[in-house]
Amino acid sequence: MLATPRANRLHIAILGRRNAGKSSLINALTNQDIALVSAKPGTTTDPVFKAMELLPLGPVVIIDTPGIDDYGELGSLRVQRSQQVFNRADLALLVIDAARGLSDFELEIARRCKELELPLVIAVNKVDLGPDEEELRQAVKQQLGVHPVLVSAKSRFGLSELKQEIIRRAPPDWDDVSIVGDLIDPGDVVALVTPIDSAAPKRRLILPQVQTIRDIIDHGGISFVVRESELKACLAALQIRPKLVVTDSQAFEMVNSVTPEDVPLTSFSILYARYKGDLAALTAGTKAIETLRPGDIVLIAEGCTHHRRQDDIGTVKIPRWLNQRAGGELNFHFCSGGGFPDNLGEFKLVVHCGACMLNRRQMLWRIRLAEESGVPIVNYGVCIAYLQGILQRALSPVSRNSLSGREGEENGWVRFPEAF
């Protein structure tokens, strides 16, 4: 927990043709030999994710990708892997070989970035080989619409300028969304309910709990961390009314029963639904739960892989609750980690985890893919709150009314369907 989690780092995808010097440029930018370099085209065969500090930008994830011009059966698979990083990158760095100039491959990358509103930085590499610099600048600017930075990974020429361009083009608000800090004022008390069951990691808290505590501290709040069995005693002992109670979604039923009605209640998963995704879309998806019938296909998606316990939330509890609501056995499919189906058309519903291990752009892409496929999507906390009949209460602390002034009007991720 001493390092910034990968999901909270700026993701920079390095794209380009084979042997354009992508890996060499990564090594030069980071001053480390982290990427395998060879004169043989196609050395990088899969996207490689490397968390590091890129000064003065800070913690980032560099994604080294295979050449976008690979060919053959295996090469096509590599290209497909490269294209998938568009869905999780916060910024694209296109590397062009100065000796070979522009091709349709670079034009396609620029087009895709524009389509996805993905910030694009262009580095023309190998300028130490003697091409006409001004001619290169003009050609790239004219055809790709972006002013390039001329660099040499070998001689380190232009690296400082490239870093500055990356900083300038990085989305200014990529890490500005709060988990809970915008819902509290300095001095407010927040009670965090963290069940310690068989799924809890030994002697530590899970990532959403740790990050929520840190966010409360950063905003001058006071946090109390208790198990669900001690919450009632904790609330009775507090001399001031908590501004908010946040619980693990699995304990919603018990926590709801002991938390006074005048104390706002929500869950870590619901907070993460807006922190990492689109809470409005994930809330709207609950309408599909009532339409589920035995035999319908439901996808349970998680952003990480972990050891499954006997009563696992994703593979056991949520399927059991949904089967009960549907009145029979549903057909559940599961995916975890970086894998996510490109074709969601066969599913009646997607139930996603809180996405603590995914970056915001990747989670938003998954939500958008579901919407484009016409498939409703919910997340664990929203789904559980709905099934237990407390969705309205769980959403109340993060509704538009909980924010004030322009913040409540402009933050699109706090809007809700009229039904809620």
Image (cartoon, rainbow, N blue to C red):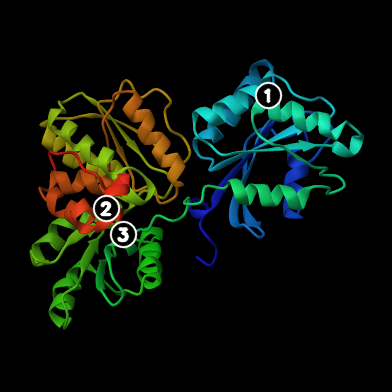
Residue 285 position by quadrant: top left
The answer for how far apart the CA atoms under marks 2 and 1 are is 41 Å
Q: Amino acid at mark 1?
A: Gln
Return the x and y of residue 115 as percentages of the image width and height: 50, 27
Q: Which residue lies at the image location 36% right of the left edge and 44% below the top edge?
A: 277
Residue designated by label 3 = 198
The answer for how far apart the CA atoms under marks 3 and 1 are is 57 Å
Of pointers 2 and 1, the one earlier in the residue sequence: 1
Task: Assess whether mark 1 and mark 3 are in contact (beta carbons under 8 angstroms).
Answer: no
Residue 227 position by quadrant: bottom left
Q: Which residue lies at the image location 23% right of the left edge and 54% below the top edge?
A: 398
The answer for how far apart the CA atoms under marks 2 and 3 are is 39 Å
Task: Assess whether mark 3 and mark 2 are in contact (beta carbons under 8 angstroms).
Answer: no
Q: Nearer the viewer, residue 380 or 245?
A: 245
Few, some or many residues within 10 Å of mark 1 (<14, 14–19, 20+): few
Please tell me whether mark 3 sits on a helix, a strand or a loop. loop
Residue 194 falls left or right of residue 147? left
